[in-house]
Amino acid sequence: MKVSVFIATSLDGFIAREDGSLDWLPQGGGEEHGYTALMASVDAVVMGRNTLETVLTFDAWPFQDKLVVVLTSRPFVGRTPASARLEFDKGSPNEIVSRLSQRGIQHIYVDGGITVQRFLEAGLVQRLTVTRIPVLLGGGIPLFGPLSHEIKLRHIATQSYRGGMVTSEYEVIA
């Protein structure tokens, strides 16, 4: 199974403010920077509960008709968009990938800080795409945290955009 990460950070490496707010992101996601192509290529999205709660504050559901698997150990009682295909699950990244693979899922997009960290730590991510937004937050929720081992990456490409965003794509090699 192919596992991809596609995420935005502030220039100082934060994916959200301390309270989870994403108000610093460009309106409407900014100019097209690869998200549409990614979504066309994935079969499912895997995210954590906190990420879901943030996404539910958006004006529109960003995952179209894709299956979205939310990792949580607590029951979810919130309202979700009618068009959302949501499932709630728990387990290790390896267990999640195994279950999705058994269902014929071939490519997943992993979203959310802790979930990204757990899938990277488990050695399951092949592609890591990070879009840096030209803003310094000075604090917040970091994309990366402590690791039990070094993870090596190979740079594939970097693209800058008129609005100041810079997207870098990496292959995880070890």
Image: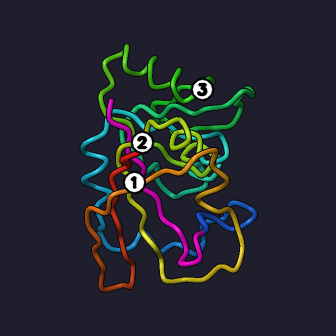
Helix, strand or loop at label 1? It is: strand
At label 1, the amino acid type is: Leu
Helix, strand or loop at label 3? It is: loop
Marks 2,3: beta carbons within 8 A: no
19 falls in the magenta region? no
Residue 139 versus residue 75 in the image, above or below: below
Within-10-Å neighbours for mark 2: few <14, some 14–19, many 20+: many
Measure the alpha-carbon separation of dots 2 and 3: 14 Å
Q: In which quarter of the image is the C terminus?
A: top left
At label 3, the amino acid type is: Ser
User: Residue tagged by mark 2?
Assistant: 125
Q: Residue at x 47, y 34 (%)?
A: 68
Residue 100 versus residue 157 in the image, above or below: above
Q: Which residue is drawn at 61% across and 40% down?
A: 48
Helix, strand or loop at label 2? It is: loop
Image coordinates for residue 129, horizontal then vertical, percent: 38, 58
Which image quarter: residue 6?
bottom left
At label 2, the amino acid type is: Val
Measure the alpha-carbon separation of dots 1 and 2: 7 Å
Which image quarter: residue 158?
bottom left
Viewer can see residue 47: yes
User: Residue tagged by mark 3?
Assistant: 92
Residue 76 versus residue 114 in the image, above or below: above
User: Residue tagged by mark 1?
Assistant: 128
Q: Which stretch did the figure color magenta?
A: 1-13
Within-10-Å neighbours for mark 1: few <14, some 14–19, many 20+: many
Image coordinates for residue 145, horizontal then vertical, percent: 65, 55
Q: Which residue is drawn at 26% across and 67% down?
A: 157
